[in-house]
Every structure is written in structure tokens, then in C-alpha cells.
Image (spheres, grey):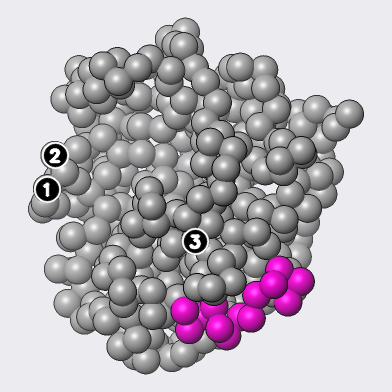
Amino acid sequence: MTQPIKQQSAKAFYDDVDPICITGLTRSLNPDTHVYDLQIMDKKWVNTYEFYPTEDLTSTAICLIGITRAKADPAELGMDLKQTLEAMYDLAKKRNYPGGFGLVLWANAVCDGVDFNTLKQRCGITIDDIGKHVQALTTMETSWLASGLAHEYHRHNDEAVKSLLDATVGELMDVRYQPKHQIVTHAGDSAESGHGIRRWIANFADQVYTIQALAFYAKLTGDERAAKISTDLASKMVEMQGAKGQWWWHYDAKRGGSPQPYSVYSVHQHGMAPMALRACEQAGGKSFEEAVVMSRSWMDDNELGVNMVDHDTPTLWRSIEYDQGKLGDVTRKAKSLLGLAGDQSRKSPPQLRVNFETRPYEWAWCIYAGAIERGIDPDRHIV
């Protein structure tokens, strides 16, 4: 029997789950498209595009980031690195998803791909008017762009890239960050459509990718304000962390609290929170060791008492989510967006269930976080 994760060291945890992640990454690479567009849903393998039109692009970029950070051998994963890079460039142009460009840029930089100007041309994107560009992005996407630009600047020390990086980080610190509650918004003050409507109701991805991006910037440039905001954001998330180490899903940047705590996602617990908190530490922030240990421990010591690590399938199941039917789901989301829900994170857990899904990027962020925990040389990565 696998030792309970809460008693395992970081090394023991990642030693246990790495083979699962490598298997998932091997199986999710489509030999016909050369990108990561296969996933598990309801315990069956499906194509991501059937359900999430941009998942193939974002997952491919994150998989390349994770694989290079963990120094996994692409050949052993059945991947030709150059072929997948080329396929990613073509896919970026095809999907026409400006929000995903930051991840593509990040992946290209750590894989030592094409130069920055060629990449923009290949992806069919223009970001010269950076102020206007970031206004249309969510905070998660803006943070992806900041991280991508940071890694590109780390690679080639290009002052034009640095200028774009400074402006993007400025947007995160001056517009998205709300110092009263130490939470970032979901979008900017001039966001359009659905993102503008829910501007104040951010998700954990908005928070965690901002923590990470500002930490990258602070470590790269020595910027003390970026380091402080990264640490303040991280400290707030840790303050709000659940009793079992949960990272809640939604955060109210105007009123504070978590209006919609669930779903709690495994990738946040084993990958994204640990990697962001470690980046924050390396940029000069305080230690978040206890929060990281609790984060991983949730994987088998959670609300449902189930082990989210499935060695038989094998995979790491996606989340524990609400099980309240369509009407309950619509009502809950409406209250959350209208600011009528209040802080739900301290209330007793509602009826819940396991979501038997895994997307490719989840395995990738797991091995990325594991590489940081093991102290593997970052090489082209900032952390």
C-alpha cells in the first residue's frame, strides 16, 4: 500500500507520482498531430478539442515547459522536440487565442526555439501595443505573458522584450492587484464581455500565476516591489488555505473571502501552488513550507477521504467538485458573480464528488513542481 502522502517527504511524493505523470504525458501526445491533445474524461481517453477548443495549445506549451524543467528525455516520451515545437507554432496561429501566447513564448524560450520576432510571425500575433493587448487578457493570461517574456528576456537579454515585460508586470501590480484584500482581480478595468462582468471574482489560477510571474520578475531584475506583492499575494492565499490544505477556486477581490470554494483541483495541490510558492521563496519571500506540505497532503487526506492518485488507471484525478445538480450550479454561480454569496470557505463542505478527468498540463505541472522540490538545475528556467 502507498504510504499516506501527508507523511511523505516531497521527494517520496514525486518519486511515487512521476511514473504516473510520464505515462500520462506519453499517452496524451497525439502521434498524428504531434501536440498534447488527448486527455482522460470520465475515465476514457478523448480528444481535448471536442470539449475545450484551446486546451491542445495551452497543454502543449505547458507540457514542453514541464518536460524541460524536469529534464525528461523527449525521446522516451515518444516526442520529437523540434516537431512538437513546429506543430505548436502552427496550432497557435490556427487557434487564434491571444491569451495563450504567453505560454507559447515561455515554452519556446525554455526549449531554445525560434527568435522572438519569428515566433510572433509564426503565431500570427502582434503585441507592440502592449497596453492595449493586456487589457483584453484575463489576469491568468497576463501572468502567462509576463512569465513568457521573463523567460525570453532571460534567454536573450533583449531590451525590447524587457520593455514589454516591464509594461506587463506593471499591469499586474498597478491594475490587477488589489492591496486592500491582497487579491488580484480576474480581469482589467476595461475588460469586455463575460470577463468584465466577473472582473472582481477571480479564480485561483489568476492568483497563483501572478505570484509566480512576479517572483520570476523579481528574481530576474531584483525588483523589490514585485517581490513584496508576490509575497503578499502568497501570504493571503496561505491565510485562506483550508484546514486540509485546500486552495479554493474563487476569490472576491472587492469584498474579500471565497464566494465559491469548490472545485478544489489536484493540479493546484500538487503542482501549481507548490511551484508558485517556491518561486516566491526564491525571489526573497518568506518560507511557505508548511503550506506546501499541506497542499500535497490533500491528495489523499481530503474531504471525501479518497486518494486522488490512481495507480491503476494510472492518473491523478482532476478535482473534488460540487454535486448539486444543474439548478444548484447555476444558482451558486449567479450568487458568486453578483457578490451575494459571501465567504463560503468556512462553511461545512456541501455534497461533493470526484471529477474523473485529467488534462495533459496537469501531469506536466506536477513534474515541473517535482523538479523544483528535488533541486534539479533549472538551466533555461528562472526557477
Amino acid residing under circle 3: Asp
Which badge, 2 or 3, comes first in the chain's sequence? 3
> In the image, is residue 189 above or below residue 163?
above
Real-space Cα distance between discs 3 and 1? 28 Å
Q: Are marks 2 and 3 in contact (CB under 8 Å)?
A: no
Label 1 SS: helix
For mark 3, what is the residue? 37
Q: Amino acid at mark 2?
A: Ile
Q: Is residue 4 left or right of residue 125?
A: right
| 75 is higher (above) or lower (below) than 36 | below
Q: Is residue 262 magenta?
A: no
**Which badge, 3 or 1, is on the more N-terminal residue?**
3
Q: Determine the CA span between mark 2 and mark 1.
A: 7 Å
Q: Position of residue 298 (x, y in %)?
A: 64, 28
- Secondary structure character of the magenta stretch overall: helix
Q: Mark 2: few, some, or many residues within 10 Å (few <14, many ≥20)?
A: some
Residue 50 appears anywhere in the view: yes
Vertical placement of residue 187 versus 342, above or below: below
Contact (Cβ within 8 Å) of mark 2 with mark 1: yes
Q: Residue at x 31, y 74 (%)?
A: 94
Residue in the picture at 46% in, 11% down: 351
Report the magenta residues as a range.
75-87
